[in-house]
Image (cartoon, rainbow, N blue to C red):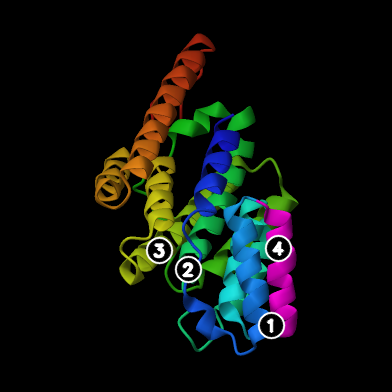
Amino acid sequence: MLKRRLWLFLSLLAVTGFVSGEVCLAQKPEAVESFKMGMSYKLQGSNFQAREKLQEALKIDPNYHQARVELAGVYADLNMLPEALTELKKASKSAQKVPKLRCYQGLVNYKLGLEVWTNLVQNHPEYLFKDKGTVKFIKEGLPAETQIDKLKKKIERDTTNLEARHELRGMYYEVAIAELSKAIKEAAKDTLANLTLGLVYLERGRKDLALKQQALLEKIDPKTATDLKNMINFVEEGKKEWEKELKERNLVPPGKK
């Protein structure tokens, strides 16, 4: 239920207010027109039509990096996360600074982490309490992508390895935090980036940092700040319910021995 509400909430936020003026990144007028139509569909919440038009823009002009990033955003809204990552990886190779690139990279990694976490706690709710936001999951010396791929293969070989799944979740969240922090440095008033960062902090057990993001959003978009506050309360209530259930089942959450 938590996963469903969070993803629905994010999908609604992701389609508002992001028709940028960066159409100058395209070189062909036909691509610009398709891009504008795609973004119009996205604002209406018509993601399948938006995907079609953004794909059309890229077919006309493969170097239209803004269209590629927004296509990744549409894929994220549709929970087509591998496809979103593919488009973001292509866009990241551009020599130009592409608006929303880091924001969507953060959003996609957040959703990937949320997916791993949800699958884990559905059958092992004791893991809901384990992450206190103090452990660093990504080690220095190797790219995060390499470490994530290596851990995913380890999990494929042993799907019962709960600790590895917990670690994978943490890796995705760390990448999300890094990318979203950079996105906010580039565009301090990016509502989606600020909101998603608050949600990632919440998932990592850092309610204090989530509340700081709420305070920042109060100055940018009070309605979204209220939405984040509601999500903080929602998650906290959910944790209390899980804790009560664990006690009734005589289970001890990791870290609370």
Q: If the image is split into quadrants, where does the C terminus sit?
A: top left
Q: Secondary structure at mark 3?
A: helix
Disc 2 target residue: 100
Tell me residue 211's x, y (percent): 28, 41
Q: Which residue is mark 3?
A: 178
Q: Is residue 18 above or below residue 16?
A: below
Q: CA distance from mark 4 to mark 3?
A: 27 Å
Query: Of discs 2 and 1, which sits in the foreground?
Result: 1
Q: Earlier in the sequence, mark 2 or mark 4?
A: 4
Return the disc, 3 or 1, that comes first in the chain's sequence.
Answer: 1
What residue is drawn where x is 45% and y is 14%? 244
Q: Secondary structure at mark 4?
A: helix
**Which label's residue is closer to the chain start, 2 or 1?**
1
Question: Which badge, 4 or 1, comes first in the chain's sequence?
Answer: 1
Q: Is the stretch drawn in magenta largely helix, strand or loop?
A: helix
Q: In the shown orientation, is residue 256 left or right of residue 115?
A: left
Residue named by callout 4: 51
Q: Is residue 238 magenta?
A: no
Front residue of this view, candidates 176 and 68: 68
Foreground residue among 24 and 187: 24
Q: Which mark is residue 30?
A: 1
Q: Mark 2 or mark 3: which is in front?
A: 2
Magenta part of the chain:
46-60
Q: Which-is-in-front pick, marks 4 and 1? A: 1
Q: Is residue 62 visible?
A: no
